[in-house]
Image: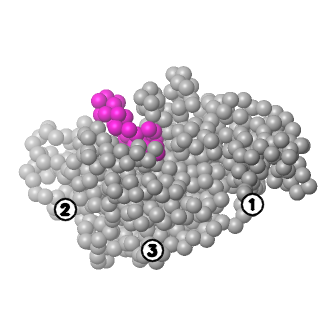
Amino acid sequence: MQSIPPSRLLTDTAMGRTPADLVIRDGQWVCVQSGEIIPHTDIAVKGERIAYVGPSAAHTIGPDTKVIEAHGQYLVPGLLDAHMHVESGQLTVTEFVRAVAPRGTTGMFVDPHEMANIFGLSGVRLMVDEAALQPIHVWVQMPSCVPSAPGLETPGATIGPAEVAEAMAWPGIIGLGEMMNFPGVFMSDEKMHAEMAATRAAGKVIGGHYASPDLGHPFHGYVAGGPEDDHEGTRAEDAIARVRQGMKAMLRLGSAWHDVAEQVKAITEHGLDPRHFILCTDDSHAGTLYHEGHMDRVVRHAIAQGLKPITVLQMATINTAEHFGLSRDLGQIAPGRYADIVLVPNLIEFTPTHVFAKGQLIAQNGQLLIDLPTYTYPNWLTHSIHLGHPLTAEDFRLALTPQPPLPPGEGRSDSLPPAGEGLGVRVANVIGVIENQAPTRHLRLEVTPENGEVKVDMSRDLAKIALVERHRGTGGVQVGLVQGFGFTARGAIATSVAHDSHHLIVVGTDEGDMALAANTLAEVNGGQVVVRDGEVIGLVELPIAGLMSNEHASLVAQKSDKLLRGFQEIGCTLNNANMQLSLLALVVIPELRISDLGLVDVTKFELISVFENH
């Protein structure tokens, strides 16, 4: 017998000829497509999709229809995260869903370029397969830049136009992940443009990542190349420029990247059309997800910046769906769309009481009501840390190549007084951390070597940073200097989540503790660790590719909390310092980074020495 077309089934339900499976009664319809809030609204659902939205759905109720009384609560479309990395949550796709679905997230657009940098296309395929099993919508953006900056870092795998073209045919692939090699685009790199051409040929969205404050010719060349959105803006002028050039401005609020407040001024102060703005999280670790929230947190924050709640909800739902060409299926409460519906008593506080995804009540009052799928990663994915040999304090020495003393009055830092003229003072290129932002500063600070090497100087907040090669077991260690962590005690912190090539990053004030931190991560096959006075005082094990835990989201959050307390015990007061740490090797965001090849000046895209020549 011929099956009934879905559209006919929805029509028959809307007309009352076929009973609905679910009816939600008497709510306030947040109609993002029209910008209205309409009281006394019912919703009738058949299967996974909405059949009817209107003043009364009594005619759709049958003997087996499940009826839920909204009691005047707001009926909000399920929240969509427009750009994010599951790996940054330290969780698998399944555990990430466990953490965020009860908070109202029913759709995520994930870019697994962390996994791609370690295991290439095979790693991406695993995440696509796991995403397909979830009770909410999880679309995958094919990573575009592996490595993110060729010649400046060495990843564990590579991806090119052939891999991108292959992935574009996979179910679940929504587009091309953030095009991080922005100089490659405006300098007409053949590989970057071939990847974007393959994406356009597939009719899918090209994600952007223009991490530069330069809005001149390079920016215009980048936009002309094809990226259609960008989440790297930090200023109102960044958002304005992107929207004027036809891009969608993605405003992010992650654990450590707080870029919404400044950029919404493009709407609140400059009057731009908010329908071209989208909200996302980019990077949120398990502690933030578990204690503060996901897209619900972003919604609350954006409203607090002075935007109308209906505007913010458009930025978290329909704007995203339209951008990715999915508005026929989601992003609004309307017939034919998936029944992804969140009930909240107050839009300002935005605390969901009920979360429906694909027509199913999946969470109530913060508790997940359904079983999540079981997905087992292969064994080869859990043994990816290869140091070559155990590290010692000697590996973290910062030796100074003998150079003539500085001539008096020359090469001095403007911010520091002369320190020992003629006594071997050198100018060092130092990574300067900017709290709550992804960019760093390129500092030039005077240092005085002792017996041919440069030591840490806690009085000046000057610590050592090291990049330890982890993919091929070369034993390579690059050592430099960093300022901004605020360490006041002997210790070290380390992570195998080190965007984008994901070698080990170690920062510390004691070489022995730095070695212990790196060796500990090798023993547990990856993670994040804090060491104080020769003792491990905080550890999050991340054995899946050195990026993700195989444990429950709540347990990972507890370990993450202990880790951050450990950071504080050695004096670090940065907000979510583990996130700041993980980006210090991201050689596509200005100004100064470290890779397995050395220090990288990201404004010039070239390798430089730790110490300047005179």
Q: Nearer the viewer, mark 2 or mark 3?
A: 3
- Residue name at image x 62 percent, y 61 percent: 134
Q: Report how far apart the C-alphas of labels 2 and 3 lie in the structure.
A: 35 Å
Residue 11 seen anywhere in this rendered image of the structure: yes
Q: Residues within 10 Å of mark 3 (few under 14, many from 20)?
A: many
The stretch of residues the image draws in magenta is: 204-231
Q: Quadrant of residue 478?
A: bottom left
Q: Residues within 10 Å of mark 2 (few under 14, many from 20)?
A: some
Disc number placed over residue 496 in the picture, else none = none
Q: Is residue 253 left or right of residue 583?
A: right
Magenta residue check for 565: no
Residue 565 seen anywhere in this rendered image of the structure: no
Disc 3 + disc 1, Cβ < 8 Å: no
Disc number placed over residue 382 in the picture, else none = 3
Q: Residues within 10 Å of mark 1 (few under 14, many from 20)?
A: few
Q: Three-letter amino acid code at disc 3?
A: Thr
- Tell me which numbered mark, 3 or 1, is placed earlier along the sequence: 1
Instruction: State the scheme by which the image is colored.
Output: one colour
Residue 347: % across, % down? 72, 38
Per the image, the residue denoted by label 1 is 1
Disc number placed over residue 399 in the picture, else none = 2
